[in-house]
Image: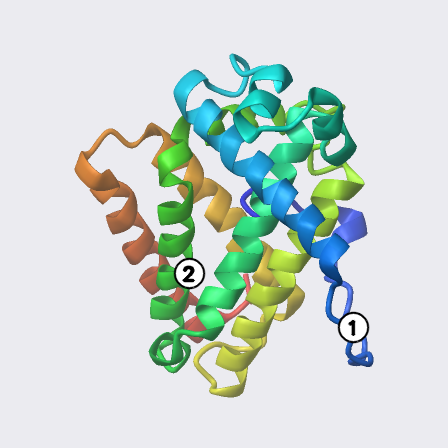
């Protein structure tokens, strides 16, 4: 999950972004059709996951709901875990696109920015709480493609971490926080995992306890950064 982000020794630093490359050609009709089919499959799967859960849903049911042959489904997604990864890929892409369109939020103080981003993520996954919980536990299995050890999962996490790193870098330039480097992005990623874990167990109305914890934690964390940065 953009949502499942861990750090190990080999990930001490987020790989730097490369220099801009020439614009790629717009996707052709075939590529658009393939993407539309993938999104149709995802919508069908999410509907079924919401109704029957991840484990209780079969690929046959997904293909039937999407209006395609089961063999066609396997051409796009080999397993339900691949579908889950695609869900988080789209979530990350939509989150970045949403943030870039929010001119007011981009000018806000760092705690407000991070609150808005994480709150948006929680809103996006809210309809699929049971599915998210199942994915979370599957990610703890080393052989799962959702595991932080898998290449597919690492590639997805890096996209999210680069996005967060850019936001922190802007805050550093404005001297809202000291230089926290790449570790700052990892810290936010780990913090998000903690918030999602709390959110999954939060029985309060509208998950208000989670939102209150999110608000307090971000404000306290920012004040700590201002006073001492990474000097422990």
At numbered mark 2, what does the secondary structure look like: helix, strand or loop?
helix
Residue 4 in sight:
no
| Relative depth, front residue between 96 and 154 | 96
Residue at x 34% of width, y 68% of height: 112
At numbered mark 1, what does the secondary structure look like: helix, strand or loop?
loop
Q: Residue 115: horizontal and vertical position, in percent?
A: 36, 60
Vertical side of 221 occupied by 136: above or below: above
Residue at x 59% of width, y 66% of height: 163
Residue at x 42% of width, y 41% of height: 125
| Relative depth, front residue between 93 and 226 | 93
Please indicate whether residue 212 sits to the left or right of residue 153 in the image: left
Estimate the spatial distance between the alpha carbons at disc 2 and disc 1, rounded to whole Å.
Answer: 30 Å
Residue at x 68% of width, y 55% of height: 32
Residue 94 in sight:
yes
Q: Residue 140: horizontal and vertical position, in percent?
A: 63, 26
| Relative depth, front residue between 172 and 70 | 70
Q: Earlier in the sequence, mark 2 or mark 1?
A: 1
| Relative depth, front residue between 123 and 211 | 123
Vertical side of 175 occupied by 191: above or below: above
Q: Residue 95: horizontal and vertical position, in percent?
A: 49, 59
Q: Residue 190: horizontal and vertical position, in percent?
A: 54, 48
Colour mapping used in the image: rainbow
**Quadrant of the drawing holding the C terminus:** bottom right
Dot 2, crowdedness within 10 Å: few (<14), some or many (≥20)? Answer: some
**Quadrant of the drawing holding the N terminus:** top right
Which residue is the site of mark 1? 25
Marks 2, 1: nearer the viewer: 1
Which residue is the site of mark 2? 117
């Amino acid at each position: 999950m953009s949502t499942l982000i861990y750090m190990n020794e080999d990930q001490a630093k987020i790989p730097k972004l490369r220099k801009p490359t020439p614009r790629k050609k717009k996707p052709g009709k075939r590529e658009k059709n393939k993407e539309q089919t993938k999104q149709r499959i995802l919508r069908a799967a999410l509907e079924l996951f919401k109704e029957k859960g991840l484990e209780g849903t079969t690929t046959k049911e997904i293909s039937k709901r999407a209006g395609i042959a089961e063999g066609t489904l396997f051409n796009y997604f080999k397993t339900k875990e691949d579908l889950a990864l695609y869900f988080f890929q789209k979530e990350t892409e939509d989150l970045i696109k949403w943030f870039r369109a929010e001119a007011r939020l981009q000018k806000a103080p760092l705690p407000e920015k991070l609150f808005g981003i994480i709150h948006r993520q929680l809103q996006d996954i809210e309809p699929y709480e049971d599915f998210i919980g199942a994915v979370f536990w599957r990610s703890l299995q080393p052989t799962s493609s959702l595991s932080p050890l898998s290449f597919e999962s690492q590639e997805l996490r890096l996209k999210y971490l680069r996005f967060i790193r850019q936001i922190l870098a802007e805050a550093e330039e404005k001297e809202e926080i000291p230089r926290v480097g790449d570790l700052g992005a990892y810290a936010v990623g780990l913090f998000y995992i903690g918030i999602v874990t709390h959110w999954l167990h939060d029985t309060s109305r509208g998950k208000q306890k989670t939102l209150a914890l999110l608000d307090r934690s971000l404000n306290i964390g920012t004040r700590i950064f201002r006073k001492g940065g990474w000097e422990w």
